[in-house]
Image (cartoon, rainbow, N blue to C red):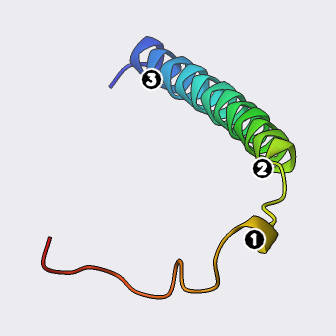
Amino acid sequence: MDVSTIASIATTMSSTATKDAVSVAVLKKAMDIQSSNASALLAAIPSVSSQNLPPHLGQNINTTA
């Protein structure tokens, strides 16, 4: 191996490491945004009041249908 080949390989490895680090940072940011969006959606769900429903509703599951 000559010196130029070693330098080329070192440069390629450094570039690849930088690209990988940027990709991971972008992925983490995207996951943080999705997490905050999911939290906002869950917070926007209105609370369910079961006061208007008869007491027998929601007690059984029809497994033969």
Which of the two discs, 3 and 2, sits closer to the camera?
2
Q: Residue 49 or 32: which is nearer the viewer?
A: 49
Which of the two discs, 2 and 1, sits closer to the camera?
1
**Residue on which the image places disc 3:** 9
Which of the two discs, 3 and 1, sits closer to the camera?
1
Find residue 23 and name its label.
Answer: none
Establish if 50 lies above or below 25. below
The location of residue 54, given as percent across then percent down, is: 64, 77
The location of residue 14, given as percent across then percent down, is: 60, 26
- Amino acid type, residue under disc 2 in the picture: Leu
Find residue 42 and name its label.
Answer: 2
Of labels 2 and 1, earlier in sequence is: 2
- Amino acid type, residue under disc 1 in the picture: Ser
Q: CA distance from mark 3 to mark 2?
A: 49 Å
| Crowding at mark 2 (Cα within 10 Å: few <14, some 14-19, many 20+) | few
Q: Residue 38 or 57: which is nearer the viewer?
A: 57
Residue 2 sits in quarter: top left
**Residue on which the image places disc 1:** 50
The location of residue 22, given as percent across then percent down, is: 68, 26
The location of residue 65, given as percent across then percent down, is: 14, 70
Establish if 47 lies above or below 9. below
Residue 47 sits in quarter: bottom right
| Crowding at mark 3 (Cα within 10 Å: few <14, some 14-19, many 20+) | few
